Amino acid sequence: MSVTLPAEFSDLQPLVKWAIPTEYERMKVRRFATSEELKAFYDVMLARMPAVLETLDSFPLNEIPASHSSLMHMAMSLAEVAPHVELYKLDPNVPYAFQEDRLMGPEMGIADD
Amino acid sequence: MNAEPDMKFHRRFDLPFDPIPAAAYTSQEYYNREIETIFKKDWLWLARDEEIPNAGDYKVKRLGFANTAIILIRGKDGKVRGFHNICRHRGNKVITETGGEETFGSNRAAVVMCRFHGWVYNAEGKLVEVPEREKFPNCFSKDDNGLIPVPTDVWEGFIFINLNPTPEKTLTEFLGPVIEHYEGFPFGELSEVRTYYAEIKSNWKVGMDAFMEGYHVPTIHAGSFPGLTNYWQGDITIQGDHRSIAFYTDGVNPETPVGTLANSIFRSSIALERDTSFELPKLVNPDRSPFWGFEQMTVFPQTLIHVGHGLWFTHVFWPVTQDTCLWEGKYFLPKPKTNSQRWAQHYATLLQRNAWLEDTATMEDTQTALKSGVLDKVNLQDEEIMLRHQYEVIKRRVGSLEDVTGEIA
């Protein structure tokens, strides 16, 4: 699967493994990532968030064109990863938690486009 | 001589202090009695209005403890009715439960058809079509073979059912003071929801217990809610079999780049700076304290409804067996207006999801200990008064453990 980002965000291209449409998959990729991977994605993505959000807000709610949906998916991945960098000392799992792979939810499998 | 602990809340509501027997969480007989005398008698919350907004929309919800599933279908008259998902021909499921615990669908004509032999029922439950009707005996009547109805009623968009065909109380009587307590809270407007669930190997009460006190917050939530370590409880009310408690705190999570960014776009977390301009019902945070975090209402037996500043969330613990339950957590926010608000709300929802993973982490270990036979009782402190009241209500409804297990013996 090749994911292409809008030209002005080509600097994020090395991190497109985080352009993941669903919460369920984002959670899984986060759990199997290393601390270093989490931090690397977090640092780069955080710096670009003002521009990312401004671009996403140039489209009406829930009408992000396919050309830009990867940006939304990467932003959602940042929301998934951020607590692990900011609160959980880079632990890829939620510490002292219920087994994460047993958590289900109808919205978890729906693409956040 | 030991000084009696203060136990001011317990004293205020005249509740006993003694430990709770472990067997209340593990006894098959006690569980069976809970199902028969509580879950098959009380009103149970099954759905929100917004889940089935249009005529012909339906939700099928499994109730494993009762070996049934309930169809909730909205009729052309706008009314939601409940039926057992059982075909009157030979007992097949009318709607195939492709979604497992919850199945959603819609039929423009507001009818449902059994896939076994094509019997068709309308949203009033009436049997309207039987293929090869002429081959049934003359004594067979379509009028006598509608879907089996389940008493269904709605409060503030919460759709309840009652497995007792002739409930002892109306939903209004059952909820009692809860109705006035939450009057004016805009549940229906805060309808952006994410649902999480898991089957947990613990008694349903172990699950409820873990959410009914604030004592665990500084330790269990040190990861996700490090700012809420200084908390206190207040505004305790006992409302028949239901009860409420408020959680106050003078802290919020530390400023972090993403947390702060998200909350600057949309205030949607109980652990971050809250939107205190949000108007609450007058009985909620009655003193309008700036430290008020949220309030929890136990709608007996299995539902916890929490209201906060511009948000609300729920937990439900469905019994499955005496040592298994199904947990459902739902987090409700206002509909976002922009894509960045969607992102900001998602951050807050995930933080809450992770906190719930911290909460649910304890339940299976607790059940294992209770089943070990090593632990014969559990101890409660004064601020665990919600658990105490839950146990006392169950005892009043079901009988004491000795009564139940003694009768069986």
Image (cartoon, helix red, strand yellow):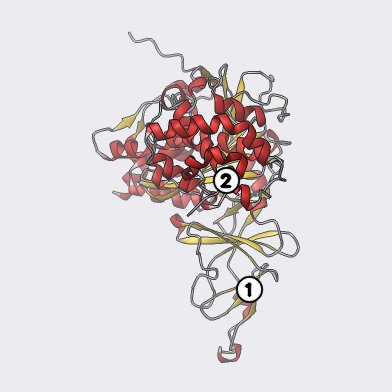
**Element assignment for label 1:** strand
Q: Residue flagged by tag 1: what amino acid is it? A: Tyr
Residue B237 percent across, percent down from the top left: 59, 28
Sort mark 2 into few (<14), some (14-19) or many (20+) by Cα contacts within 10 Å: some
Sort mark 1 into few (<14), some (14-19) or many (20+) by Cα contacts within 10 Å: many
Q: CA distance from mark 1 to mark 2?
A: 51 Å
Q: Is residue B402 above or below residue A50?
A: below
The chain that hosts pointer 1 is B
The answer to whether residue B391 shows anywhere in this view is no
Q: Where, quadrant-wise, is the N terminus of chain B in this rendering?
A: top left
Residue B19 percent across, percent down from the top left: 36, 28
On the image, numbered disc 2 is attached to which residue? A5
Q: Which residue: 45% across, 28% down?
A: A85
Q: In the orientation shown, which residue stands out farthest toward the bottom?
A: B135
Residue B341 percent across, percent down from the top left: 66, 37
On the image, numbered disc 1 is attached to which residue? B121
Q: Residue flagged by tag 2: what amino acid is it? A: Leu
Q: Is residue B62 above or below residue A62?
A: below
The chain that hosts pointer 2 is A
Q: Which residue: 64% across, 25% down?
A: B274
Query: Could you tell whether B181 is left or right of B34 in the image?
Result: right
**Element assignment for label 2:** loop
In front: A31, or B352?
Answer: A31
Q: In the orientation shown, which residue stands out farthest toward the top?
A: B1
Q: Which residue: 64% across, 40% down?
A: B342
Q: Is residue B185 above or below residue B380?
A: below
